[in-house]
Image (cartoon, grey):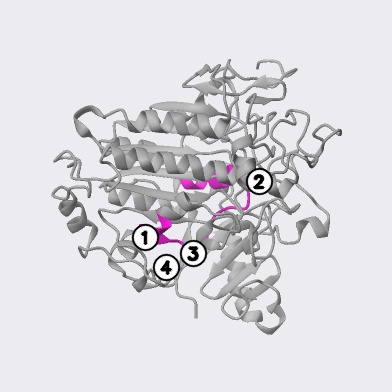
Amino acid sequence: MKTALLAAASLLACTSPMLATAALAQTAPANGKAEAPHARHPNILIIVADDLGWQDVGFNGASIPTPNIDRIARSGVVLDHFYASALCSPSRAGLLTGRYPHRYGIMGDTITPGSDFGLDPGEQTIAQLLAQAGYARRSFLGKWHLGHRSPAFHPMSFGFTSFYGHYNGAIDYFTHAREGQVDWHRDHAPSADQGYSTDLLTDEAVRIIDTPTKGGAPWMMWLAYNAPHGPLQATEQDLAAVGFDPAKPRFGEGRGNPREGASYGTKGHGNTRRQTEQAMVHGLDRGIGRVLDALEKSGQLDNTLILFTSDNGGPGGGQASNGPLRGWKFLHYDGGVRVAAALSWPAGLKPRAEAGIGDVSYVDILPTVARLAGVKSGRTLDGRDVSDALLSGKPLGDRALFLGEDYRVPAAEGERGPTDPESLRGRAAAAISGKWKLIGDELYDLDADPYEKQDVAAQHPDVVADLRKRVAAYVALRKVPRARMNSTHLPPIPSWELPGKPAE
């Protein structure tokens, strides 16, 4: 029977987080460069890939090597049952807050260029918590996707001391345009930086890592790459690395870029969509390697806790690979919500041996990181602190994880997602408890059927009834109305506004 957390997966040299952090103050990195004596809490680096297929990383059997992402797994532990939301904005919100996103109105679908809502200003993020723990530098790099119509929705309104990246869910990788306007920014101002977005984010991450903090204080960085989310565009260097043949046509050649949308150009296409996505993952891995090298060169790698994950599973259409998992982005089958993830902390976490470490939720990240940083949230959290299990091998015990919401219910007045039965299949609110997984009216035994091929709801009506009650209580947490741009949220952000939509 699948356990919530296998104790043998990962052990700390010490037996508790309290002892672990005390030991860190006396631990020097392997290269001999000692940390500042008072910097006993780890630096925090959260790396979030975008629409990454579960089997598009080496440690899950990718056909294209990802040696640098694998460095994180090899030096730490693979979270082989890590669950997120099935789509972008909700996952990012839950990762940042430790709370299920429909509690504060991030539900129904992603935040689009025309959306006037965003992350509720009343929510507390991991950056705000770490500020209380003395993390003076808290950088946000990359894709925000949690609101752009008001300064109240800006990353720097949620505890981050700097921002470099884009507001929208997707941009052209080379021009950084969305809806005919450049969506690339530094703090609150537009940025004219030129280059491939993955490389620009890596450059900025390395620059920040190479800049010492005052007094050697610990820092945190949220590095949200937009790769390999569409539009599918890669550099020629990365295309060459995955077998691009210049003698063959590029996908979409002569037809514009119909599947990628009018906002984007055709630069960076490979011979096929799949090849282009693999090249983008190669570029992502190349960038992560530079970040890891910068940490190692500066003597900070040992005492930096690194989480690598994706916001959701890979999309359908043949561009991503979720391996044997059923489904894709938007669906609550494992292909949409079970994501590639690995955690590393050389000074505090022994590398994994052979066992997996069980079920962990995206909303567990905030309480876990907060505990390791020595600070507590005063909010009601949905996530659990899993640091004891990670560090000392203690099992989590029984728990229920909830995934998504019921798409059959309108997200808000006047808003609705798909309504036809086939589109809704796999999109109902879901729960995992032990070996059981409920998706709407479907029940799967993940021990006997890990790839969700056989619905056994008819054979286990008692299990279905119990999980339905739990899901109903979870769905009842939804907040309507959302946090929208209004008189209390100030005018729209001046540096990006949907064309043709007047300021309000």
| Kind of residue indicated by mark 3 | Asp
- For mark 4, give the secondary structure: loop
Residue contact at pointers 4 and 3, CB within 8 angstroms: yes
Please tell me which of labels 1 and 3 falls first in the chain.
3
Residue contact at pointers 1 and 3, CB within 8 angstroms: no
Q: Is residue 80 magenta?
A: yes
* Relative to 191, 240 lies left or right: right
| Kind of residue indicated by mark 2 | Glu
Please tell me which of labels 4 and 3 falls first in the chain.
3
* Residue named by callout 1: 386
- For mark 3, give the secondary structure: loop
Please tell me which of labels 2 and 1 falls first in the chain.
2
Query: Which residue is drawn at the image coordinates 77% and 34% (left, top)?
Result: 261
Query: Mark 4 to mark 3: distance in Å?
Result: 7 Å
* Residue named by callout 3: 80
Query: Which residue is drawn at the image coordinates 29% and 35% (left, top)?
Result: 135
Mark 2 or 1: in front is 2
Query: Mark 1 to mark 4: distance in Å?
Result: 11 Å
Mark 1 or 3: in front is 3
